[in-house]
Amino acid sequence: MTDSPKVIVQQLDSSILIDIYLDGFMTGAATCALNYSQDDTEADRVSETLVRAVKTDPAAMEEIRREVRERLLGIEGETRNLDVFHPDYKER
Protein backbone atom coordinates (compact mmCIF):
# COMPACT_ATOMS: atom_id res chain seq x y z
CA MET A 1 0.00 0.00 0.00
CA THR A 2 1.31 3.44 -0.89
CA ASP A 3 1.00 6.45 1.34
CA SER A 4 -1.19 9.30 0.16
CA PRO A 5 0.63 12.58 -0.42
CA LYS A 6 0.17 15.12 2.33
CA VAL A 7 -2.19 17.87 1.23
CA ILE A 8 -1.97 21.31 2.76
CA VAL A 9 -4.95 23.63 2.46
CA GLN A 10 -4.67 27.28 3.35
CA GLN A 11 -6.70 30.41 2.76
CA LEU A 12 -5.63 32.55 -0.17
CA ASP A 13 -5.66 36.31 0.05
CA SER A 14 -7.18 37.37 -3.28
CA SER A 15 -4.96 40.45 -3.43
CA ILE A 16 -2.08 38.08 -4.17
CA LEU A 17 -3.82 37.14 -7.43
CA ILE A 18 -4.02 40.81 -8.38
CA ASP A 19 -0.29 41.16 -7.68
CA ILE A 20 0.43 38.12 -9.88
CA TYR A 21 -1.72 39.63 -12.66
CA LEU A 22 0.12 42.96 -12.38
CA ASP A 23 3.52 41.18 -12.43
CA GLY A 24 2.57 39.64 -15.76
CA PHE A 25 1.17 42.95 -16.97
CA MET A 26 4.46 44.69 -16.09
CA THR A 27 6.49 41.98 -17.81
CA GLY A 28 4.39 42.31 -20.95
CA ALA A 29 4.67 46.10 -20.91
CA ALA A 30 8.45 45.90 -20.43
CA THR A 31 8.78 43.44 -23.32
CA CYS A 32 6.72 45.69 -25.57
CA ALA A 33 8.73 48.77 -24.56
CA LEU A 34 12.02 46.90 -25.03
CA ASN A 35 11.02 45.80 -28.52
CA TYR A 36 10.22 49.43 -29.31
CA SER A 37 13.19 51.20 -27.71
CA GLN A 38 15.89 48.48 -27.42
CA ASP A 39 16.90 50.11 -24.10
CA ASP A 40 16.51 48.03 -20.91
CA THR A 41 16.44 51.05 -18.61
CA GLU A 42 13.80 52.80 -20.68
CA ALA A 43 11.70 49.62 -20.92
CA ASP A 44 11.77 49.21 -17.13
CA ARG A 45 10.87 52.87 -16.60
CA VAL A 46 7.94 52.69 -19.02
CA SER A 47 6.53 49.48 -17.54
CA GLU A 48 6.88 50.71 -13.95
CA THR A 49 5.16 53.99 -14.85
CA LEU A 50 2.32 52.12 -16.54
CA VAL A 51 1.76 49.76 -13.61
CA ARG A 52 1.92 52.66 -11.12
CA ALA A 53 -0.76 54.46 -13.18
CA VAL A 54 -2.94 51.33 -13.21
CA LYS A 55 -2.59 50.85 -9.44
CA THR A 56 -3.65 54.44 -8.73
CA ASP A 57 -6.67 54.36 -11.06
CA PRO A 58 -9.66 52.87 -9.19
CA ALA A 59 -11.57 52.10 -12.41
CA ALA A 60 -8.59 50.28 -13.94
CA MET A 61 -8.07 48.26 -10.76
CA GLU A 62 -11.74 47.29 -10.70
CA GLU A 63 -11.45 46.06 -14.30
CA ILE A 64 -8.46 43.93 -13.33
CA ARG A 65 -10.34 42.53 -10.32
CA ARG A 66 -13.21 41.63 -12.64
CA GLU A 67 -10.88 39.88 -15.08
CA VAL A 68 -9.26 37.85 -12.28
CA ARG A 69 -12.68 36.98 -10.81
CA GLU A 70 -13.96 35.83 -14.22
CA ARG A 71 -10.86 33.70 -14.76
CA LEU A 72 -11.34 32.02 -11.37
CA LEU A 73 -14.98 31.31 -12.22
CA GLY A 74 -14.02 29.85 -15.59
CA ILE A 75 -15.75 32.58 -17.56
CA GLU A 76 -14.27 32.93 -21.03
CA GLY A 77 -13.30 36.57 -21.39
CA GLU A 78 -12.89 38.63 -24.49
CA THR A 79 -10.26 41.17 -25.43
CA ARG A 80 -10.82 44.46 -23.61
CA ASN A 81 -9.23 47.87 -23.63
CA LEU A 82 -7.94 49.06 -20.28
CA ASP A 83 -8.27 52.84 -20.18
CA VAL A 84 -6.02 54.26 -17.47
CA PHE A 85 -6.08 57.75 -16.07
CA HIS A 86 -2.53 59.03 -15.64
CA PRO A 87 -2.40 62.42 -13.87
CA ASP A 88 1.15 63.19 -15.08
CA TYR A 89 0.42 62.44 -18.76
CA LYS A 90 0.62 65.46 -21.06
CA GLU A 91 -0.97 65.43 -24.52
CA ARG A 92 1.63 65.96 -27.21
Image: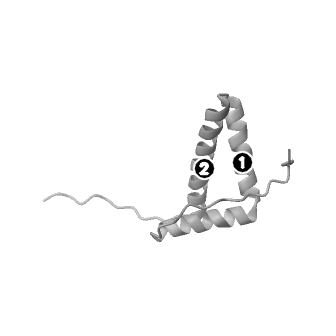
Q: 35 and 64: which one is in front?
A: 35
- Tag 2's secondary structure? helix
Label 2: few (<14), some or many (≥20) within 10 Å? some
Q: Position of residue 81 (x, y in %)?
A: 64, 59
Name the residue at 76% across, 60% down: 57
Say whether disc 2 or disc 1 marks the residue closer to the N-terminus: 2
Q: Position of residue 70 (x, y in %)?
A: 52, 69
Name the residue at 75% across, 52% down: 53
- Residue holding disc 2: 25
Q: Is residue 90 above or below residue 31?
A: below
Q: Are marks 2 and 1 in contact (CB under 8 Å)?
A: yes
Name the residue at 84% across, 49% down: 89
Q: Is residue 69 left or right of residue 43?
A: left
Q: Is residue 39 above or below residue 5?
A: above
Q: Quadrant of residue 84?
A: bottom right
Q: 75 and 37: which one is in front?
A: 37
Q: Work out which residue is located at the far front of the displayed protein and give it.
A: 92
Q: Amino acid at mark 1?
A: Leu
Viewport quadrant of the N terminus: bottom left
